[in-house]
């Protein structure tokens, strides 16, 4: 029975792989026909969904201005991930039992594992204080990455036919004297189709990683001031050596330079957090889209598994680094 099941499963996978190769971009290129799936489109800016005027402009390649207000597809994805997370934990805590069921046990395992991890780094007292933000960052990053793998994400969206224009130089002449002439004509040709997905993984929009990086930065600075008070500034401003006399000025200058480096490291941390998460999430989206376009169906399944792992790792890295920086921020300067 098991052997026949394995054979049937293997033949089914092989058949799907063969069909995917034939109808995908690679097989269609050999057969000289158009691919079964439309060519994937990757846009760095998020797409406006509402209002309709902003959506139409976004389809034509326009971006939201500095004061532009619109509901974007990455915002919708963030809202959806937040609702799913809230639903999971509300359902897990709604009917608490002395002998928990499977779902309650799963939620408890997640919470206890994260709490033990945070307390192991920051200690019991600070660990419980850090836990809400650290756990939120980890789960938010991971779930946003995982939900981006759902099939309906690239399937539901808006299409718009738009003209595409390019410049064609007809004539360009110049002489040896000061009089130069150039005739440049513009020619508008061709039609293109633009598409905006209703949902798009939030991590592929630079704004979401940047917002998380700013939250992590403010969290670290808040706890530094809360635990150490005004003495937290001694990590960055080190001028006491100049007050001890000329014999200490050289060491004081080195301390001042180190303080400037500490300030730069705090600011650069926002940049590194942002682009680490953004780069990994965007690369994952491109990998999935391209693999599904080249050979649909089975061929992209291993890449989905890879992206599940990447989402977990990125959540751990972002939350773990935030926890580490917060733990270091509450140490006194002489304890470093």
Image (cartoon, rainbow, N blue to C red):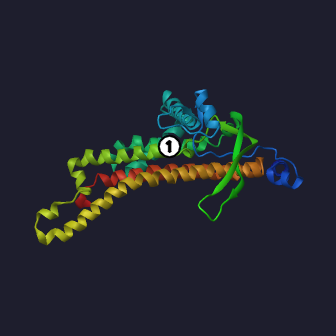
Which residue reaches farthest right?
A: 31
Quarter of the image containing the C terminus? bottom left
> What is the quadrant of residue 257 in the picture?
bottom left
* Residue ID for mark 1: 207
Q: Is residue 150 visible?
A: yes
Instruction: Estimate the x, y position of residue 326 in percent, counting from the top left.
Output: 35, 50
- Number of marks present in the image shown: 1
Instruction: Estimate the x, y position of residue 110 in percent, counting from the top left.
Output: 50, 43
Q: Secondary structure at mark 1?
A: helix
Q: Residues within 10 Å of mark 1 (few under 14, many from 20)?
A: some
Locate residue 23 relative to residue 124 in the image: left or right. Answer: right
Locate residue 60 relative to residue 275 in the image: left or right. Answer: right
Give me the residue at 38% from left, 48% from top: 217
Q: Which one is nearer the viewer's eye here, 229 or 168?
A: 168
Which residue reaches farthest left?
A: 245
Q: Which one is nearer the viewer's eye here, 318 or 61?
A: 61
Q: Which one is nearer the viewer's eye here, 264 or 182?
A: 182
Locate residue 321 relative to residue 58 in the image: left or right. Answer: left
């Amino acid at each position: 029975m098991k052997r026949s099941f394995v054979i049937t499963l293997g033949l089914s996978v092989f058949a799907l792989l063969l069909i995917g190769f034939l109808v995908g971009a690679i097989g269609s290129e050999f057969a000289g026909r158009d691919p079964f799936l439309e060519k994937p489109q990757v846009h760095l800016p998020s797409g406006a969904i509402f209002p309709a005027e902003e959506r139409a402009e976004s389809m034509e390649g326009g971006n939201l201005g500095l004061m532009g207000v619109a509901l974007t597809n990455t915002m919708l994805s963030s809202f959806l991930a937040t609702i799913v997370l809230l639903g999971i934990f509300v359902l897990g805590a709604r009917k608490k039992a002395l002998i928990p069921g499977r779902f309650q046990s799963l939620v408890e395992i997640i919470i206890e594992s994260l709490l033990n991890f945070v307390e192991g780094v920051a200690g019991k007292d600070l660990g419980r204080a850090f836990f809400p933000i650290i756990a939120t960052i980890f789960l938010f990053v991971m779930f946003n990455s995982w939900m981006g793998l759902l099939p309906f994400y690239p399937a539901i969206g808006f299409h718009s036919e738009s003209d595409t224009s390019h410049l064609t130089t007809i004539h360009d002449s110049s002489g040896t004297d000061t009089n130069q002439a150039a005739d440049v004509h513009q020619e508008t040709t061709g039609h293109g189709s633009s598409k905006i997905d209703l949902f798009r993984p939030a991590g592929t929009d630079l704004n979401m990683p940047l917002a998380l990086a700013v939250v992590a930065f403010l969290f670290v600075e808040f706890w530094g001031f809360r635990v150490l008070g005004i003495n937290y500034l001694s990590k960055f401003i080190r001028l006491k050596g100049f007050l001890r006399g000329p014999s200490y000025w050289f060491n004081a200058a080195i301390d001042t330079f180190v303080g400037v480096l500490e300030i730069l490291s705090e600011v650069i941390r926002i940049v590194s957090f942002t682009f680490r998460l953004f780069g990994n999430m965007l690369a994952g989206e491109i990998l999935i889209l391209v693999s599904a376009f080249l050979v649909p169906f089975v061929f992209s399944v291993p890449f989905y598994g890879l992206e599940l792992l990447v989402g977990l790792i990125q959540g751990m890295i972002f939350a773990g680094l935030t926890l580490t920086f917060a733990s270091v921020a509450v140490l006194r300067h002489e304890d470093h």
